[in-house]
Image (cartoon, rainbow, N blue to C red):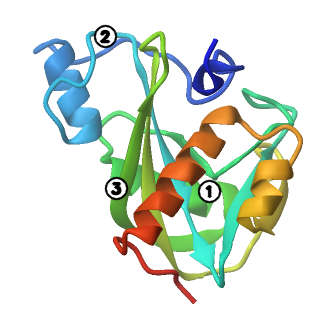
Amino acid sequence: MNPTSNRQVDEGPQRRPCASPEGTERCAKRASGREGCHPRHDCMYGVVGVLEQRGRLLMIQRSERVRAPGLWCFPGGEIEPGESPAEAIVREFREELGFEVEAGDELWSWLREDGGLHLLWWEVRLIGGALRPKPEEVQAVKWMTDDNIRSQAGMIPNNLVFLDHYRRRCAAGRRSDQT
């Protein structure tokens, strides 16, 4: 099993059937803004927010009451029906953390090996609010350096794969750190 597929069964949003009468391609296009990214109608679509300040990334430890209990990851959640990925990440930050954010660029897309989970990673900018984690969903919050993330026990593996991609992107000058 490759590192991106470890413990993936229990992470991410709830699985739901594709509601699109046009089929998989339309479903994938609706969720990701692209033409048919994979061949499954029952794929779960989620968003992940990347908030960086002064060289540290915001990470959460998931509550014991949600999927992937107790594991560490970037904040995010399910894209609800009728919601764009940008709207979903703004809502997730407000509901889970109390932060008001603005969605920036889509940074990365990850599809679980079995095709059942598609995550879209978005840059977000903090525009207001106060950190108030919702205990039903978030057990702990930390601002972490790359080294902290890599050494944190219980980090969801695809977050480490994303971090490598993100830092290559930053090194190529395609994103500047927010202060």
Q: Circle 2 is placed at which residue position? A: 41
Residue 114 x, y percent position in the rendering: 47, 9
Residue at x 65%, y 78% (from the top left corner): 55
**Residue type marked 2:** His
Residue 155 in picture, x, y percent from top left: 77, 41
Percent position of residue 22, x then y: 10, 15
The residue wearing badge 1 is 95
Q: Is residue 155 visible?
A: yes
Using the numbered discs, state the Cα–Cα distance from disc 1 to disc 2 in whole angstroms. Answer: 27 Å
Which of the marked residues, 1 or 3, is nearer the chain's N terminus? 1
Q: Residue 50's x, y, as percent?
A: 54, 61
Q: Observer-nearest residue: 69 or 2?
A: 2
Label 3 element class = strand
Picture disc at residue 158: none
Q: Please rate how many residues cluster around mark 1, counting C-alpha atoms within 10 Å: few if below 14, some from 14 to 19, many from 20.
A: some
Task: Classify mark 1: helix, strand or loop.
Answer: helix
- The crowding category of the residue bearing disc 2, from other C-alpha atoms within 10 Å (few below 14, some 14 to 19, many at least 20), is some
| Image quarter hosting the N terminus | top right
Q: Label 3, on which residue?
A: 106
In front: mark 3 or mark 2? 3
In this rendering, the answer to whether 56 lies above or below 159 is below
